[in-house]
């Protein structure tokens, strides 16, 4: 650590400690609590000792590799390519295969990056191995190939950065996920693990309850549909869920509660519902949130965005960490 930022030391205290052979540089490696007292704020510790940086050289160009640099690159990607929604979907589908019911196993391990079989070939993951990973390719080369972060951790962090960039809550990321080394480390099928848009309440419970989620969690996680769209060439469904598909807010819930929808069939033959007042759509699984145990939470989030953000964050972290062991706080 080469700087004190806005810190100052009492001159007498400094003289006493340096007289004992301790230089200013050596002081920086002391525990801040013992040096400055128990009231020393953690946020200021970061200012005193920034995150470690690593240097790498590629093509004769020196690259500064750090957590802060990685986050900055991800923010730039999200803003310039407007790709936040697909990065959220990437993390969701990588981690969301976890189950403890009739099917077991699964975790966020980046197995879907392999397309010779396994998760990379699941119909539910259409567009992820080519479009999403294509967008992340420069970042993978810079930070994954040089050993700073795993692919699996990158997918998690990219989604969390995207959520915040689009106006959503800050979501803390923990690290330490290991990458699959081949498609053989995929789960056996998407069936029973990832939700289908053309099914209702019972299906949502069947998919999410073995992952440890209750009705509140299911509704909160569904709120990720506040961004992005359905692509006919990937899912067979077609259209945006909300009128501002790059803004992470509670409009998904206000639309479900307040808008009227008419059933229609897509060109691919899939049933969906189109708003009578806009070009937005909902799926059967979306409107199921107005039924049974889901309705109270849908109405709650429509009325209170802060409540949605809080409950979404808790459920989202659980989704991303299910099946993972030994995660650490820092990269």
Image: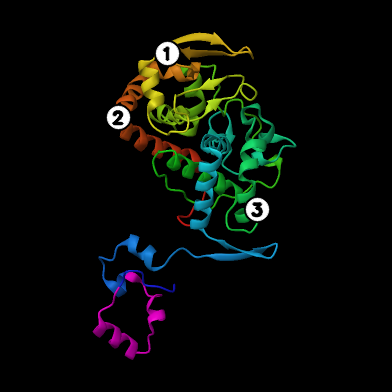
Residue 331: % across, % down: 50, 57
- Quadrant of res 19: bottom left
Quadrant containing the N terminus is bottom left
Direction from residue 136 to residue 69 in the image, left or right: left
259 left or right, relative to 67: left
Residue at point 41% right, 25% down?
A: 252
Q: Which mark is residue 141?
A: 3
Q: Secondary structure at mark 3?
A: helix
Residue drawn at point x = 47 percent, y = 29 percent: 245
Point out the tag, 3 or 2, that comes first from the N-terminus. 3
Query: In front here: 284 or 186?
Result: 284
Residue 119 sits in quarter: top right
The residue at which mark 2 appears reads as: 304
Q: Are marks 3 and 2 in contact (CB under 8 Å)?
A: no
Residues at badges 1 and 2 in contact (C-beta under 8 Å)? Answer: no
Q: Which residues are magenta?
A: 8-32
Q: Residue 121 sits in which quadrant?
A: top right
Q: Residue at x 36, y 69 (%)?
A: 5
Q: Position of residue 130 (x, y in %)?
A: 67, 37
N-terminal of the two: label 1 or label 2?
1
Instruction: Note whether 26 is above or below 92 in the view shown.
Output: below
Q: Would residue 11 be counted in the magenta stretch?
A: yes
> Residue 241, how many percent across, how many down?
48, 23
User: How would you rate the neighbour count of disc 3 (Cα within 10 Å): few for under 14, some for 14-19, many for 20 or more?
Assistant: few
Measure the C-alpha gap from mark 3 to mark 2. 41 Å
The residue that mark 1 highlights is 277
Along the polypeptide, which appears first: circle 3 or circle 1? 3
């Amino acid at each position: 650590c080469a700087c004190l930022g806005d810190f100052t030391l009492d001159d007498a205290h400094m003289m006493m400690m340096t007289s004992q052979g301790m230089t200013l540089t050596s002081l920086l490696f002391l525990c801040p609590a013992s040096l400055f007292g128990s009231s020393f704020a953690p946020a200021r510790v970061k200012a005193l000792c920034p995150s470690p940086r690593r240097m790498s050289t590629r093509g004769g160009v020196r690259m500064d590799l750090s957590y802060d640099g990685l986050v900055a690159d991800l923010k730039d990607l999200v803003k310039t390519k407007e790709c936040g929604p697909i990065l959220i979907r990437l993390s969701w589908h990588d981690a969301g295969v976890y189950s403890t019911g009739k099917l077991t196993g699964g975790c966020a391990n980046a197995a879907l990056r392999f397309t010779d079989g396994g998760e990379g070939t699941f119909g539910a993951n259409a567009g992820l191995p080519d479009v999403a990973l294509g967008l992340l390719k420069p970042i993978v080369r810079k930070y994954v190939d040089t050993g700073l972060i795993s692919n699996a951790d990158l997918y998690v962090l990219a989604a969390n950065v995207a959520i915040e960039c689009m106006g959503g809550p800050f979501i803390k990321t923990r690290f330490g996920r290991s990458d699959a080394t081949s498609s053989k480390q995929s789960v056996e099928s998407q069936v029973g693990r990832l939700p289908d848009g053309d099914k209702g309440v019972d299906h949502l419970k069947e998919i999410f309850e073995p992952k440890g989620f209750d009705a509140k969690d299911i509704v909160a996680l569904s709120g990720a549909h506040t961004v992005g769209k359905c692509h006919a060439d990937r899912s067979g469904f077609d259209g945006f869920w909300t009128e501002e598909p790059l803004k992470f807010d509670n409009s998904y819930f206000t639309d479900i509660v307040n808008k009227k929808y008419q059933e229609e069939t897509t060109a691919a033959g899939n049933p969906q519902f189109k708003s009578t007042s806009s070009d937005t759509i909902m799926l059967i699984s979306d409107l199921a949130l107005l039924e049974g145990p889901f309705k109270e939470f849908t109405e709650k989030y429509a009325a209170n965005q802060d409540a949605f953000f809080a409950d979404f964050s808790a459920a989202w972290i659980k989704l991303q960490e299910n099946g993972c062991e030994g995660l650490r706080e820092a990269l």
